Amino acid sequence: MIRSELSEKNPYWIERHRYHELKQFCLQYPIWKKTYESIDGLLGRPADLSTFGKVKHISNPTERIGIMKAYYSERMDMIWRAAEKAEPELAQYIVRGVTEGLSYDLIKVKMDIPCCKDVYYSAYRRFFWILNKERD
C-alpha cells in the first residue's frame, strides 16, 4: 500500500521512490538471515554454494563462504545500526516493523511497544532517513 508522502519540510524527508526502495531493502532481512544461518551448515561443495548466489567464481569454498557471510551480515548490521541511531530504546521495535512490514498497531499487540504511535513513527521516519545516508 502506498501512503501519503512526507512534506519536504519534515527534517526526515526522503524522496518517495527512494523510501520505497529502502523499504523493500529492509523486507529482504528475513531472507538474508535465513541464508546467513544456512551457510553455516554447508560442507563447502560447489553445488551447495551455487544455491546461495554467485560470488565472482572464487574457487576456494572457504573464501566463498566467508564473502557470502560478510555480504549478508553487512546488510543485517546496517539495518540494526540505523535503528539504534534512530532511537536506541525502540530499535528492536523498529527492526521488527521494517523487516516484517508490521504497523504500529501490530507491534503494540505483539510486543507491547512502550511509546505512542507518534513517537514510534517519528523514530521510524528517522530510521529511513539514516538508512538512506548509510546506503549511499
Image: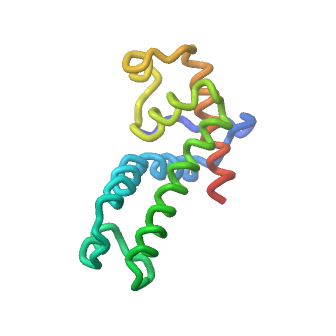
Frontmost residue, 37 versus 112: 37
On screen, residue 101 versus residue 115, left or right, reads left
Left or right of 130 on screen, residue 28 = left
Instruction: Indicate the position of residue 123 as horizontal and vertical percent values.
Output: 63, 29
Q: Position of residue 110 (x, y in %)?
A: 37, 20
x 41%, y 69%: residue: 65
Q: Residue at x 39, y 38 (%)?
A: 100
Residue 131: x %, y % from top left: 62, 47
Relative placement, left or right, of 66 versus 44 is right
Measured along the vertical axis of the image, is residue 110 above or below residue 34? Answer: above
Number of labels in the image equals: 0
Looking at this rendering, what residue extends furthest in the left direction? Answer: 47
Report which quarter residue 80 is drawn in: top right
Q: Is residue 68 above or below residue 15?
A: below
Image quadrant in which you'd find residue 49: bottom left
Which image quarter is the C terminus in?
Answer: bottom right
**Residue sitting nearer the eye, 10 or 88:** 88
Identify the residue shown where x is 51% and y is 30%: 92
Which quarter shows the N terminus?
top left
| Colour mode of the rendering | rainbow
44 is higher (above) or lower (below) than 38: below
Q: Residue at x 43, y 76 (%)?
A: 55
Residues 67 and 99: in front is 67
Query: Percent x, y for residue 76?
Result: 50, 50
